Image (tube, grey):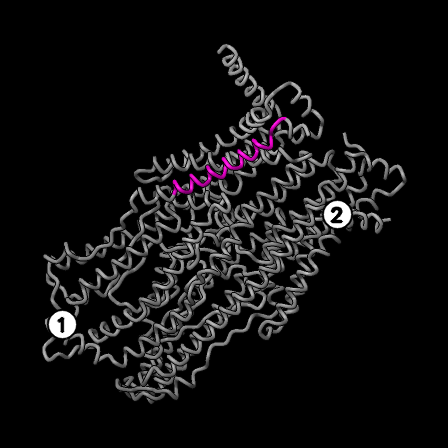
Amino acid sequence: MIIGIAKKELVDAWRDGRFRLGAVLVLVLLVVAGLLARQQVARETAERDAATALERKNWVEQGNKNSHSAGHYGVNVFKPSSPLAVFDRGIEPFVGTTVFLEAHRQNQTAFLPAQDATAMRRFGELSAALALQVLVPLLVVLLAFGSLAGERESGTLRQTLSLGVAPRSIVLGKALGIGAAIALLLAPAAAVLALLLSRSAPAAEGTWTRAGWLAAVYAAYIAVIVAGSVAVSASTRTARSALTILLAMWALNCIVAPRLASDVVHGQLPMPKLAEFEVEMQKDVMEGLDGHDARSKQIEDFTQKTLAEHGKTSVDQLPFNFQGLVMLESERMAGVVFDHHFGKLWDRIQEQDRAVAWAGFAAPMLALRSASMAFAGTDFGHHRRFARAAEEHRREFVRLLNEDLMNNARPGDHGYAAGRALWEALPEFRHEVASAAEAWRDARPSLIVLAAWLVASLAFLGWSATRLRAVIL
Amino acid sequence: MERDAASGGDSVKSFTLELRLFFAERATWVLLVLFAVVLVYGLANGAAAGRTARDSAELVEKDTFQWATQVRDALERQALDPRQVAGRPTSALLPPAPMPALAVGQADLLPAHEQVSLWRLEKPSEGRSELENPSRLLAGRFDLAFVLVWLLPLFLLAAAYDLCAGDREAGTLRMVLAQGVSPRVWIARRAFARGAPVLLIAVLSVLVAGQIGGAEGVGARTGFAVLIVIAYGAFWLALAALVNGYARSAAAAATALGSIWVLFVLVVPTLLNVVVESLHPSPSRAELVAEARAAAAVAEKRGQELVSSFYRDHPELAPVGMQGDMMSRMLAVQDEVGRAMDPVKQRFESAILAQQEVVDRWRFASPAIAMHEALTDLAGTGYWRHRAFRVQVETFKDQLHAYYSPKFHKRAPLTKADLPNFPKFEFIEESSAAWRSRVLAGLAGIVALAIAAAVVAAARLSPRKLAA
């Protein structure tokens, strides 16, 4: 019986001209978004590869110079985009794409793509994710609002019930039918997206696992919307009131919640001010993290300690270039300060993001969006991994340069210059997108929220079936 | 005459009746209270963003003032080497927006101050005024502009989606028409009775926004914002009337209006964005960075030659023996890099200008876009004011360079007498004619769209067509 009702609902949906129109629109948007995003990612990858090659050439051909000067000359590294960014661009337009790696300083990523665009981007970027998060739920609402309330109004529900059909079968059948209509609509889009993904550049490991998770979270989200919508339709007197309630919930979930949640969370967990952040970090670099040992004092202690270790009285007697060792030590000291301040800043951003994901208990779209970005590799967690990897690369490369100075420049030799052999010996920056397991860890709060929604909406659907009445007064 | 007066009185009576009917429903009160709440929240958020911008600006001003005082005090005591003064960057500040509480716009994304120095080859910098969670930039702010552009139509439609579709469904429409009422007047009156309370609260919120942290001349901006809000509201009400001319049931009207809202507010803007960025793609920042360094390497190798040729061209600036020291060589090299890279950098500005021009031309594809552009323009947080700032900063860079560079090469000491001539950045606001013409165009477009919708609705709402 359930299957029969589901089939009827499915046929009804396909016969509905408005649904067909909406379905075609959504399908076209999904495919166009996928194609455009793929083209864009391909272009950006090519540009980044060209820039990376040119930067390597700049670096290798910088000419002979003191190895520490080469540290000041520095190198730019560029953020690779995640293969699944074609599906969900996430925060990528709003984070920097370039980091300048140099001696003494940990720089922030620079050049936000959105800064080179018009305000149209702020309306939301066309992406498959946006279509699935916002438009498909609306389509579900439009399909589902009349499913039971409409039959109740026209009296057909009374007839069906009087035939002895179990209310549970009616309600479940309706939900399954609508779910099947949406699934049939999305299947071709999913196929096109999968094809695009398989034909794009060699996918990083875990890409398909991530894609599988994406499919799962979106399926769960849409199931929540279907179950919730049918349950509302089962519990309201008229189709009109079902529609009003569902549209209001849709607007709250898809339009109001994202902005409201991020503004409220920001109010509760504010970001530090840029000027203060920089001043405090600089202060700690100069005075030490605990604030009672000035840098000069620390360096002085370090000098005495080194001299004592080697049993010498002057740094000129040391068997290596002491200046190089001091550079190494001060990088190490600064590194501790950078880790502390950047760690605090990034923790705060992730705290905010997690709070927004938990706010998904009020609006499931928030949890879905954060899970989607995590699995697509375009959330802040992934950006942080890139920034962290770039910083580790910076430390490694500055360390190698300072060690060269320490070991190869004679004490007091100010004319020392290293050359191409050393520049070529320094490793190139490589960054792989994190494993699917790490993405899963990032997405955990959102997954919990979505699972709770799934259970709750199915329970609501079941409950509405037990209370299904031919007429509600 | 008498009859006209009587019908005038009837109209007022009918209108009051519509209003009373509207307010008799509990849902109306819920709707209005909810709308007032989101407006207040939007206002509060916009005001907070305005305060943050003001605080950042004050910090920059304080810093600039302290440095100026230091330099002045030093010059009181002795002449200074120009290298000591010119080496430190000067802050160029975009003052807080004239009507910040109206719209956050691009202010959370684009920098409102920049450090301008003699050196042309900058490191890639964060290019931001504040630390911001990227997810928040992605979501956008819950400011007044968001409530007015996105939510106002939803509230208006919730109040006025059923102007006569429900009557048609219930069969009462024929009864009404049988009384000889003009359906156009009747529907218009109903739309007005239901839309006016919502619009009135919206207008009040705009008036309040004008009072919060507004700059001089905010009155005119507030006035325009009020007109735009009314025109935008009229468009959605006319659309509701139009849809009601066709819809067979209240639910059908709601479905159609909801879909149109999604189309105008969500779909068309994202599509326009795609068109704009495909027509005029921005060049690659990554390549710019790498190319600038390649150019620097070339210039570096020619360092001595560059400075020598500079001194040949400007013998008056050359030191004795025509041998530039390291600093002047560095300056010559950087100038050369600047000259090589300026056209490349210019490509970014022209790409985004071209994009914005397409947006301006096509903004009437959706009144939501036109409305959003107009509100951010009025607030002073949109594209144009930020562009004006960037253009003026570029000019200032040239000024600063023209002033300090010769002194730098000559090592001519700076004295107290030079103090008033030090280049200072002062942002010149756009002429009010400039923003007025843009906003007026936007207003005219929205009004035209509203009239078009109203005309089509009026044609449909003839007694004959309605009864059919």
Image coordinates of residue A195 in percent, x first then y, are: 65, 68
Which mark is drawn over residue A141? none
Q: Chain of mark 2?
A: A
**In the rendered image of this protein, does residue B453 appear above or below residue A205?**
above
A275 lies left or right of B44: left
**In the rendered image of this protein, does residue A212 appear above or below residue A50?**
above
- The overriding secondary structure of the stretch rendered in magenta is helix
Image coordinates of residue A218 in percent, x first then y, are: 66, 57
In magenta stretch: residue B327: no
In magenta stretch: residue B447: yes
**Picture residue at 34% right of the left edge, 60% below the top:** A279
Graded by Cα atoms within 10 Å as few (under 14), some (14 to 19) or many (20 or more), the crowding at tag 2 reads few
Q: Which residue is mark 2?
A: A15
Check disc 1 and give the amino acid type: His
**In the rendered image of this protein, does residue A324 appear above or below residue A276?**
below
- Quarter of the rendering occupied by the C terminus of chain B: top right
Q: Which residues are magenta?
A: B439-463
Check disc 2 and give the amino acid type: Arg
